[in-house]
Image (cartoon, rainbow, N blue to C red):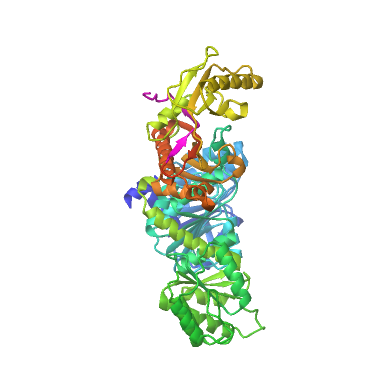
Amino acid sequence: MQDLMNDLGIAPSRRVRLKRALAPERIAFVGGGWVEAGIAYLHQLGFEGDVAVVNPRRDRIGGLPCVPSLDALPFVPDVAFVCVNRERTLEIVPELRALGAAAVVCNAAGFAEIGKDGALLQDRLAEAAGEMPVFGPNCPGFVNFQVRAAVMMERFGLQDPGVGTALVTQGGGVMLDLLSSMRDVPLTHMIGLGNQMDVTIPECMDIVLDDARVRALAVYVEGLPDVPQLCAVAHRALRQGVPIVLMKAGASDAGARAMFSHTASLTSPEAVNDALFDRLGILRVGDLPEMTETLKMLTVAGIPSGKRTAIVTASGMHSSLAGDEAERCGLDVALPSETATDALGQLLPDIATPGNPLDLTTVYWGQRTEQADCYRPLLADGYDVALNVCNYPRPGIWEIEAWRQEFLGFADVVAETGVKGATVTIFPESFPEDAKRLHVELGIAPLQGLREGMQAVANAVRYGALRRACLERSDEHILLASAPPSAGPVMTLGEHEAKQRAAASGLRIPESIVVERRDASAPAIPFDGPYVVKLANDAVLHKSDLGAVVVDIPDGAGVAAAMDAIAASVRAHDPGIATDRFLVESFVSDAVAELLVGVTRIEHVGLAMTLATGGTMTELIADRSVVLLPADPAGLERAFDGLAAASLCRGFRSAVAGDRQAVLGAIAAIAAVACEIGPDLVELEVNPLLIRPRDQGAVAVDMVLRQTGTPMRSAS
């Protein structure tokens, strides 16, 4: 545990203060009428600790007597909620620091969120706070339902989940939305952090992970959290088996990138974020309904061990809709075994057909025992997830007890088989509160809405797979190094030199020679044709755009003619470009597919490798995957296998298969070069990497390498 704390960068004394603040026994409110709702909420929760109010002009607030100053407080607070304007906040915070308060929640707005002037005030606030942890500013506060403590600006509902989800968010909107919804996510904590001047989202995640009742972490961010801290807390959550479900809004600036390469245009900030979250085993969701249902699946039912899914319904329409939606989400709706089919055939009425989804019709509707007898053969057939798809009726239409008995029969068999179970309603609103409570009590997830419910199941399955993959990796392939980029000018290596540099790490390159063009004679070339001729000028990266490449040249005379043609074409585009040096290489004519492999340095994250199908058509095809470095071989393989190039490599539609092992080896070699250069790397791009037929290798025929500082020179 101590090592993890150090990895997160929290000093032990700071961690003690944060734990005191988030599970306080002594709370001080500083402010006027705006703190009344927070005090009332604290009473509503049943907080049993000490509470005091500081206000020099009022006798009582929220039913409590006021003290005129911080010096008059009867105790040193574990946390103080400061709800005054920003100028007064700047006066009160240093007083709390001098008093010895463990932490402070700054509710006032008007700091860094409004621009430069506010940012200057926020710097003053940080200086005034010193070593005292500060939540905010522009912060709604937090509630810990487990200890019935709230340090909030408003009422945020009652929860008594026993176990559930801890929500950590930048702002209060998500907190309000969750509690205003009818989704009934069991919550243990809600923590809103505002500007995160001091206390960060990963720090709060780390603190709540100490509570064994926290079964999942829900996180809402707009900007990317501190990456080393996020890595450390995600690493801890993985090992504890606590899923992190994250929603990120807005486009973040993941760092300055070179703007003229294919790699830069493909490596978007959000693609890098997704690669980071996958690396850390963090489950990213797209919206709040998806988040709520995913959290219920994970916290109530648990993490499925696989994606084999059994679906039971009482309607043919529901069966069709559920089966389609499950397959859209990537769930495996496999048919039952012959044994299960035979057993079902003996139990089902004549109008029902054994299958998956299983439509039981309504013959046994409302009969707990008979329904369970029909579910038993299917759910005992090796499925990982069992889904009961239905709609509950509105009050006064039908007798809801029949739905209750049907569900209890389903729950009986889920408990017997140990499969992860959920009920999914077609409409989100068609799930009564008492029915949801019964589901939670019996460990069956109540999922609302067919689309988001099925997606929630698929997300839980995906989290299980992510976690298993992460736990198989070394720490080096989860955590990310935080070394800053090197200073100094950016240098571009010549293509020939860059390739020689990569060849030393095992990347296969064409035979080549650099020719100084001094006369019209054919150059002496020490290897056989056919040939490729390129202009050797570091300032020209995309040679084909200028006509600076000629391919499939049969002999030396053709090489000389190609040099003349290239020089004329380049001069026509820009007479100022030097055209006196050329790179002559052997021509590869038997490629079955082309691949781009690029690595860029992303500020605050590190090295991001982009793999893309294509070559000159890469942006048009837009088939890509991103993985952060260093990565283990399995991670690189998964990134490649997600591309169309991988299908081509396997021999798509009886075409010639490519050399898969050589491709994976080439990708690993490029990753090794990038990691060796490390903080000096600005950009490395191989485009294309030609995938040759099986056992013929993969060849890097074009390469760009840009780095800061003084490049390492190859021995060749």
Highlighted magenta segment, given as a residue range:
696-716
What's the residue at 53%, 22% (across, down)? 559
Quadrant of the drawing holding the C terminus = top left
Residue 708 located within the stretch drawn in magenta: yes
The x and y percentages for residue 25 are 42, 60
The x and y percentages for residue 500 are 41, 28
Q: Is residue 644 above or below residue 685?
A: below
The x and y percentages for residue 554 are 52, 27
Q: Is residue 113 above or below residue 329?
A: above
Q: Is residue 131 above or below residue 557?
A: below
What's the residue at 62%, 29% (across, down)? 545
Residue 135 visible, this angle: no
Q: Nearer the viewer, residue 315 or 171?
A: 315
For residue 485, what is the image quadrant?
top left
For residue 338, what is the image quadrant?
bottom left
Residue 133 located within the stretch drawn in magenta: no
Left or right: residue 40 compared with residue 442: right
What's the residue at 42%, 22% (across, down)? 526
What's the residue at 44%, 46% (across, down)? 660
Residue 638 visible, this angle: yes
Q: Nearer the viewer, residue 250 or 525?
A: 525
